[in-house]
Image (spheres, rainbow, N blue to C red):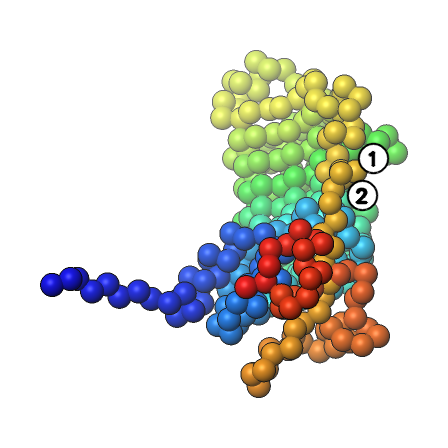
Amino acid sequence: MEEQCEFRHWDELIPDALGLIFSNLPLQEILTVIPCVCKSWRTVVMGPYCWQEIDIEEWSNGCEPDHLDRMLQMLINRSSGSLRKLCVSGLQNDTIFSLITENAGSLRSLRLSRSEMSDSIVEQTAGRLSSITCLDLSYCGNIGAHALEAIGKHCKLLISLCRNMHPLDAARKLSQDDEANAIAATMPRLKRLEMAYRLISTTSVLNILSGCPQLEFLDLRGCWDVKLDDQFVKEKFPKLKVLGPLVMDCYEMGEWDDCSDFSDGFEYLAWEFEMGNYDDDDDYDDDDIYDGIWHGEGRLEELELRFYEGIGGDAGMFGWPPSP
């Protein structure tokens, strides 16, 4: 007698399992291909299951600020308070940063490189980031010691902080010891700290070593005013690894373009926000914030993110696979 095997249909998998699988796909495919496969898969994509970890850093490097704001609003709303990790670059205003903090109840890791939020908004909203353990504020030129102090006071679980800058940014400053001292005074649980190309002194670095006794890695590349005695560091902080200040990286070799996260060869993902029409009567609409985006004059023609259904021939021109 032949053994009978029972196969379970993909659309019968629980949403959590499907979300875990879909999260391994590129953002483009999650937003354009998966919703068109079947009703249950579309429900998963429209819900929080795929959006507990959001990484759109590469895409955000090449898009317009307004498009970035709308994408973040959509994905954060879909996460429904379950967001654990967010990586994005180039926030241009305090409003979108405030939106992120309003939905940060479960957030553990936050990377906001090259963003333009202000000191004041960080001070006002830092209390909402109390669950953060890893934070990257590299190349954020509008924040300083006041923001870092507020973060340190409210983010008691913080163990990793990146605050690197570009050499040209440092050239415009007189001293950044106030930032180093704010870190030393308020972030005792840090294990990893990156402060490349900062205008800080040896004294402020010693304050960090004293105030952050659990520190295991310290990046001081390009901090030319810092003079640490190697033997002293080895004896007093045997678990600490210090990188720099004298490190020959691409900045020092004059190859700044190669180091930049912005690439001239970056292929802008020509997507369009346009929801397809569905025959069922179920309500899959996003929140009212998206009214006018999907149809009519308010649609984002420039963004070109298309939830295509395969009946047209234009999908191929973007290099996309045929819609299922």
Q: Is residue 264 visible?
A: yes
Amino acid at pointer 2: Gly
Q: Quadrant of the C terminus?
A: bottom right
Numbered disc 2: secondary structure? loop
**Snapshot quadrant of residue 280:** bottom right
The residue where tag 1 is placed is: 169
Residue at the left extreme, as displayed: 1
Point 60% across, 59% down: residue: 322
Determine whether 138 is above or below 308 in the image: above
Q: Position of residue 131 (x, y in %)?
A: 55, 55
Chain-order first, disc 2 or disc 1: 2
Q: Is residue 177 visible?
A: no
- Front residue of 232/1: it is 1
Q: Quadrant of the N terminus?
A: bottom left
Amino acid at pointer 1: Asp
Q: Are marks 2 and 1 in contact (CB under 8 Å)?
A: yes
Q: Position of residue 144 (x, y in %)?
A: 77, 44
Q: Position of residue 249 (x, y in %)?
A: 70, 22
Point 26% across, 66% down: residue: 6
Point 60% across, 79% down: residue: 278
Point 55% across, 33% down: residue: 215
Query: Where residue 141 is drawn, which disc sits there?
Result: 2
Label 2 to label 1: alpha-carbon separation: 8 Å
